[in-house]
Amino acid sequence: MTARERLDTMVRFIFNLTMTGLAIVLLGILVLLSTSVDEDVRRNFDQSMRQLRDIGLAIERETLNARNLNVDRDVRLAHLENELLARVDAIGKDLATLYPAERNALQAFRAGAERAFNAIDSVAFEANGHDAVWGKFVALDQSARWYADRTDTFRRSHGAFLTHRDELAEHSRAYVQALRERGQASQADNVFRAAQQVLERAQRGGESDLAQIESIANRLADGSQARSTVDRTVYSSLIDAMRGIAPSRADVEGSIADITSGRLQRELGDLREMVTRDHLYQLGTINDSRILLNVYTALLLLVLGYFGFRLQLSYRALNRSHDALEDRVKERTQDLERALADLKESQVQLVQAEKMSSLGQLVAGVVHEINTPLLYVLNNASITVENVAELRSAVEQVANVVQLVKRSDASPVVLRAALDELAANLDADAALEAMEEIQSLSVDSTEGLNQINELVKSLKDFSRIDRAVEDRFDVRDGIEKTLVITKNLLKYGITVEKRLEPVPQILCAPSRINQVLINLITNAVQAMEGKGTLSISTRERDGFVEVGVRDTGCGIPAENLTKIMDPFFTTKPVGQGTGLGLSIVRKIVDEHGGRISVDSVVGKGTEIVVALPIERLQVEAA
């Protein structure tokens, strides 16, 4: 290929790449403009606006009903106040999404694209900005809080009015009844008429009516009733109720006038109109962009059809090379399958080698633990044999004397001689000391044999070769047996702390779980280098039995935490580890449908928690 041809090829490639990029960018802009990501927020906003309007109207109805019917609507109005402020807050949150103070890159790009798109249409109106909308919302928020304050004032004023009304009715009845009982009927009628006039004028609530209430109260206070012998406390309460009912009723009327002024509804309508106008602006942009998107999609389909035809021609050429490549792939696949089979076989051999290595360490420790009590049992047996020989000689002499005593023809002289010989040869203190020593050595030997028996039983229970693959297993018992078997690793500076909470038995392969326990304990002991604290805990959580093994060793660096379960990964020196211990642990835990987690701090220690399901079991051949 000549330089000119290479240049032409490069120019065509750059041109095609540029046109493709422009096409993709234009498609992305049209898709962006034709979609709306704020529909849910707008629906919530509209719903909140309607609810706010309905709450305002409900407050007006409740206040008017409370005023006209003289009933207590305090609880209902308090609930509506809370709902009113909650709806305003919800509207503010929706506006914060629709009109953010600071737009992100995508929002800024979309806004710029909308302005550029609508600049083509000279009659298109501009959308309202953030400041204009939030200015309206601030006005609405202030009106809502003023509205809630006036509602609260109405509740307190109306409650005070009802209280004064009830007190007036109660005290007037009591006072009138007291006057009638004393024969002062005329005075009783005057008080009754005054109380009725106050109640009627208070019910009407006009300014002149409320002014007359004060006059009635003053006239009644200056009347002869105040100097009567009737209980002056009741009379004073009656006058106070009359004087208190007018200002509370005036406050009620003033609050109702403010509540029904329509201020909240006007601010609500202004904000709704502004946001609706912006929504229509956006909907117009979306509709126009969708039309262009359909046209653009049709053009792209034509272009794609052309390139599809070109690709069809190329496809025929590719088919010719496909057959040859398929044969080569088959050959390569066969080679990879053979390599995979070899790799699996190698992995099985390495796992078995790791198991044998662990078994060798286990047997060495058990042999050491058996050898110690066995030696002192053998030593005790040899000493016992010597003591038994001495006792045998003494017993034989005593037997001879006993036989002489039993013989009827034995002369006293012979019997006396035998006793003297027995007294000369038999040392009673030495015989007693020999028997005590035999008894002590027997106890020590029994203890040593019991230790050997415990080790043998633990080893047998640990191997589980005489039990089914799947069985119920108590992890606490497995931990105890494992600690017995690994006792040789734990007796030089290792302190074992056990917090074994009662847990249910799990369905599992016991020998496999024992292998997990011994691997975890061995790793923990090796991490502490012979000195530290080994903590083992069990607990039940959410259908799982959790076993935690914590050490106070060197810890694991953060960069190695994700690698410690990988096959062949180890931080030990060459020749001291295969890197398969934790890999086998993870494999066994995965087979049982369990979980494993690691928490480590460098310089403080590591905790590995294994969670095994109580019921579910998935066991594969080792």
Image: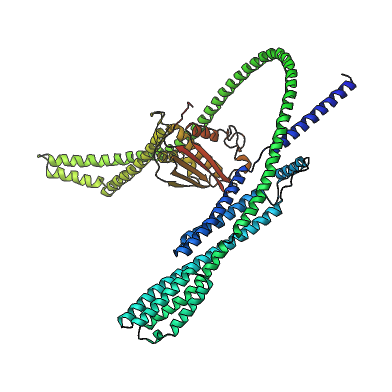
Residue occupying image coordinates x 45% and y 74% = 198
Question: Which of 516 and 65 lies nearest the eye of the viewer?
Answer: 65
Q: Position of residue 476 (x, y in %)?
A: 41, 41
Question: Which of 20 and 158 lies nearest the eye of the viewer?
Answer: 158
Residue at the extreme left = 408
Residue occupying image coordinates x 15% and y 42% = 414
Q: Is residue 163 left or right of residue 332?
A: left
Residue occupying image coordinates x 54% and y 35% = 582
Q: Is residue 201 left or right of residue 568?
A: left
Q: Position of residue 342 (x, y in %)?
A: 59, 21
Q: Quadrant of residue 461?
A: top left
Q: Position of residue 99 (x, y in %)?
A: 67, 50
Q: Is residue 437 left or right of residue 288?
A: left
Q: Is residue 83 visible?
A: no
The quarter of the rendered structure image containing the N terminus is: top right
Image mark count: 0
Q: Quadrant of residue 557?
A: top right
User: What's the colour scheme?
Assistant: rainbow
Query: In the image, is residue 273 above or below residue 155?
Result: above
Query: In the image, is residue 581 above or below residue 98?
Result: above
Q: Is residue 34 visible?
A: yes
Q: Is residue 76 left or right of residue 98?
A: left
Q: Position of residue 478 (x, y in %)?
A: 42, 38
Residue occupying image coordinates x 57% and y 20% = 341
Question: Which of 615 and 49 lies nearest the eye of the viewer?
Answer: 49
